[in-house]
Amino acid sequence: MSPCTDVTIELDAFNVGKTNIVKRKALTFGGKGLNVAIGVKRLGEECHTTGIMYNENGFMFENVLDKEGVPFTFVWNKGRARENYKFIDRRAMLTEVNDVGEEISREKAEEVLAMVRMLSAKSKVAVLSGGLPRGVHPSFYAELVKAVDGNCMKIVDASGARMFAALDERVDLVKPNIDELEDTIGRQVESKEDMLAGCYELINRGAKRVLLSLGKRGAVITDGRENYFCKSLQVAVNSTVGAGDGMVAAAAVQLEKGAALPAILRAGVAAGTATVMTVGQTSFTKEKYNEVLSTLQVKRI
């Protein structure tokens, strides 16, 4: 619902109030749902993406999807897609500045719901992901979930009121990170017990499974009965753009195959790790994914 241009800038140090010299800059055209679609395609599966796109620079997003072989059907709106800036210094410290997108009308939102109804009727998994543009209430996530065909599994990657709205309609998997979990449940997560309690709260509200990203530490998955942890590899972070989306893409593929929790978790961590190791792209390569996957171990907690 909110595509964006991500501008990743590498610096020796990020100095507030002073001039900063760029070492390297990369532009990527995506947004969470589009990044997931690219990841799914790179894993060799078929997908289709929809949502809002903007008249002034939408062709750049279409070019990327065409190159990746991802089919799309967008609802077009006036204006430009938003631009997000990510600054990474030599300590791998990340500072983000996220833009606010153009406002859309209720009519445009209804067109998106119609697209979701049509496409999900021909799909096995639907991923509903990311922020919402101005003019759209968080409760729209409940409408999106309801629009998905009853025979299609539902994955939601959102936080706060958007996630709670989706959970009211029941979903098969949610994928918060630690910050998003804290934002959603309204308290800090300071221990393993806090972490699992927060995940269980999402399950009690309507999620069948919670895949919790721990960033460079790895991830946890739970269905409220079984809990598993997978530690990530210690790798150089070339870009954080799309890492969570890579995790969702791999999880979606495994969910469609009927995989158990450990396989979903291991695939998700492999894709997220492979994404941060990939330079100048919004997603991982399948070769890097397979390389990382072969090294990962899952343990029950």
Image (tube, grey):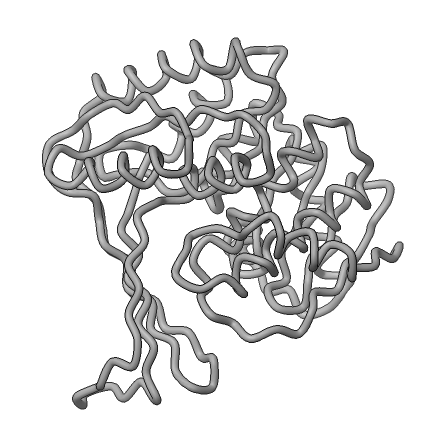
Q: Residue at x 66, y 29 (%)?
A: 172
Q: Which quadrant does the C terminus fall into?
A: bottom right
* Quarter of the picture holding the N terminus: top left
Taking the spot 14% from the left edge, 42% from the top edge, the residue there is: 80
Image point (63%, 22%), residue name = 153
User: Looking at the image, which is closer to me, 66 or 97?
Assistant: 66
Residue 242 x %, y % = 46, 53
The percent position of residue 48, horizontal first and vertical second, equals 44, 24
The residue closer to the viewer here, 209 or 233, is 233
Image-based side of 46 in relation to 264, left or right: left
Judge from the rendering whether residue 127 lies leftward or rightward of residue 86; answer left or right.
right
In front of the other: 4 or 23: 23
Residue 212 position in % (x across, y down): 65, 52
Please tell me whether residue 255 is drawn above or below residue 169 in the rendered image. Answer: below
What is the x, y in percent for residue 95?
36, 73
Q: Is residue 60 above or below residue 136?
A: below
> On the rendered structure, is 202 left or right of 92?
right
